Amino acid sequence: IKAFYEEHLHLDDEIRYILEGSGYFDVRDEDDKWIRIFMEKGDMITLPAGIYHRFTPDENNYVKAMRLFVGEPVWTAYNRPADDFPARKQYMKFLAEGTK
């Protein structure tokens, strides 16, 4: 699970469903500050392509999660900095449009 704690992004949306245990997804806001989201059994999250994020279990140090895919599964994570990918540029454009 240590690999998931490295800040990274994906070129496709990431959909996670927590089957057992609990932990935290950390995502960046438009000011590049962390937002911590607690997740536990039964919770689901969709992270858009291009968003920097990381995951860590809580003090129980156990989580079992399922990743859902649209189409062919792609597991590649790109550690920060990965700002030149079209998915990152599209995400940043989305953020900029939302703050107008």
Image (cartoon, rainbow, N blue to C red):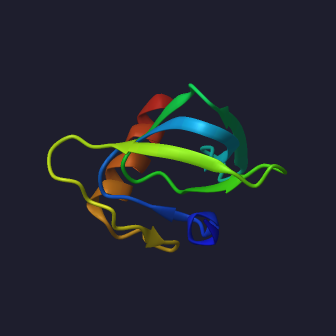
Figure check: 17 above or below 92: above
Residue closest to the eye, 63 or 77: 63
Residue closest to the eye, 6 or 35: 6
| Residue projecting furthest to the right | 59
Q: Is residue 21 visible?
A: yes
Give the residue drawn at x 53%, y 35%.
Answer: 19
Give the residue drawn at x 66%, y 35%.
Answer: 39
| Residue projecting furthest to the top | 42
Residue closest to the eye, 35 or 68: 68
In the displayed structure, does residue 43 sit left or right of residue 46?
right
Quadrant assignment, res 68: top left
User: How many discs mark residues in the rendered view?
Assistant: 0
| Residue projecting furthest to the left | 71
- Point out the image quarter for the N terminus: bottom right
Give the residue drawn at x 53%, y 56%.
Answer: 52
Q: At which x and y percent is residue 100?
A: 49, 29
In the displayed structure, does residue 63 sit left or right of residue 73?
right
In the displayed structure, does residue 63 sit left or right of residue 81?
right
Q: Is residue 14 visible?
A: no
Residue closest to the eye, 23 or 11: 23
Figure check: 60 above or below 83: above
Q: At which x and y percent is residue 83?
A: 42, 68
Q: At which x and y percent is residue 37?
A: 69, 37
Q: At which x and y percent is residue 61?
A: 76, 55
Figure check: 42 above or below 13: above
